[in-house]
Image (tube, rainbow, N blue to C red):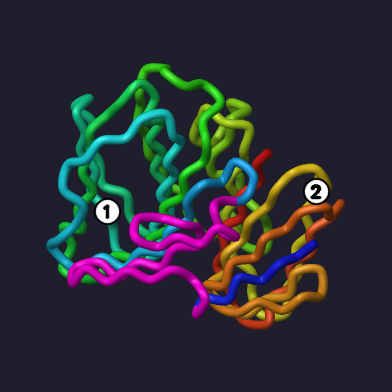
Amino acid sequence: MIDIRPFASLGHARHGWLDARHHFSFGGYHDPARMGWGAIRVWNDDRIAPHSGFPPHPHRDMEIITYVRSGAISHEDSLGNKGRTKAGDVQVMSAGSGVIHAEYNREDVETTLFQIWIETDRPGVAPSWGMKPFPKEARQDSLQLLASGERSDGALDIHADARVYGATIVKGGTIEHAADPARHYYLVPSGRIEVNGVEAGARDGVAIHGESAIQIHAMEDVELVLVDAR
C-alpha cells in the first residue's frame, strides 16, 4: 500500500515567525485518520523566520530527529548541550526522563527543516543530544543512514526500532530499497518522484506499508528523507 498525503492536505499553523505543516495530528491540528504512522508520531515541515525560534519547553520519552533543509538551527538544553546544525545535517534528541530545550534560527535567512518524532523503546532513560554533519554528496543517488536504533557506525543513535535515511537523486535517476511488508515507511521529497510507480509531488507525504521493495524514481532533481519504523 502506498498512500500519498498531498502537501495541500497537511495541517497548517502560522504563528508569524513560524509557518508549519503537520503530516500528523499536532498542536491545534487534529485528524483521527492521521495520528501517526507506526511508531512515527510527528513529522513537521517548518519554516522559521530569521532571528526567531522555539523558546525553552519540555519533552520526555520521545526520539526527536531534526533534518535541516536550508539555513541552520541552534540548539540549547537543560543538560548544557549547545550546537548549530546547518542544511543537510541532522540532530537527535532523546528526551528520555525529561529535558528542556530551545531551538533558534539565529541566521539572517529563513531556516527550513523537518522535525520528526518517533516513539521511544526505552522510556525513562537519561536524556541526550547529538548532531552530525552529513555532506549531501555522500548520498547522491543512494540512501544514507542518518539515525538508527541499531548503533550503526556513522549514524546518530536513537532509542527506537527505526532508521532515518537521506538521499539526493538527479532527474531521471532511480534508487531501490529492500522493505519489510510488516514495517511502516514514510517519505517526503523536495520535488516530483514516483514510488513504485505512484506519483508524489514536492513535500507530499508518502506512507508505505505492505511492500517488499521501494523503488524511488526522480522526475526532477530531489532531496528526500525516508523513515523506516516498526
23 in the magenta segment? yes
Mark 1 = which residue? 73
- The one nearer the camera, 193 or 20, is 20
Badge nearest the viewer, 1 or 2: 2
Give the x, y percent position of residue 94.
41, 31
- The one nearer the camera, 107 or 5, is 5
Residue at position x 27%, y 29% in the image: 99
Quadrant placement of the C terminus: top right
Give the x, y percent position of residue 14.
27, 71
Numbered range of the magenta stretch: 8-36
Residue at position x 33%, y 55% in the image: 86
- The one nearer the camera, 229 or 189, is 229
Give the x, y percent position of residue 71.
30, 64
How packed is label 1: few (under 14 Cα within 10 Å), some, or many (20 or more)? many
Question: Given the image, on which type of amino acid does mark 1 rest?
Answer: Ile
Question: Given the image, on which type of amino acid does mark 2 rest?
Answer: Ala
Give SS at disc 2.
loop
Outermost residue toward the right in this view: 212
Mark 2 = which residue? 179
| 168 to the left or right of 24 | right
